[in-house]
Image (cartoon, rainbow, N blue to C red):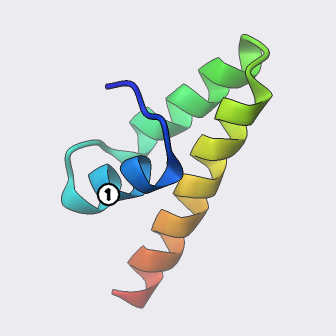
Amino acid sequence: MKYFSIEQVVKDLQSGAVRRHVIKTNERAALSRGYTERAEMFAEAIRIYDEWRTEQ
């Protein structure tokens, strides 16, 4: 799936539609291709998801 916002990524992570390692892979791929803004979006989504998980 193509993600356009942090909210989309976090929602899919929380619902189980996508796993954390897939988003981490997307982050690394974006970095290696020079898409720093996309990589930052994925990193922020993972940070928010991790916080959510610790609260659960």
Q: Residue furthest front?
A: 4
- Residue 37, by quadrant, is top right
- Residue 15, by quadrant, is bottom left
Q: Is residue 32 left or right of residue 17?
A: right
Quarter of the picture containing the N terminus is top left
Image position, residue 53 (x, y; %): 40, 75
Quarter of the picture containing the C terminus is bottom left
Image position, residue 36 (x, y; %): 78, 29
Q: Determine which residue is flagged by label 1.
A: 11
Q: Which residue is rendered at x = 33% and y = 54% of the image?
A: 13
Q: Which residue is rendered at x = 44% and y = 56% of the image?
A: 7
Image position, residue 49 (x, y; %): 46, 65
Q: Answer few, some or many: residues within 10 Å of disc 1's Cα (few below 14, many 20 plus, some between 14 and 19).
A: some
Q: Residue furthest bottom?
A: 55
Q: Is residue 8 above or below residue 29?
A: below
Q: Is residue 56 above or below residue 29?
A: below
Q: Is residue 6 left or right of residue 31?
A: left
Q: Is residue 42 above or below residue 27?
A: below
Q: Is residue 39 left or right of residue 15?
A: right
Q: Is residue 40 above or below residue 15?
A: above
Q: Is residue 17 left or right of residue 45?
A: left
Amino acid carrying label 1: it is Lys
Q: Which residue is rendered at x = 32% and y = 57% of the image?
A: 11
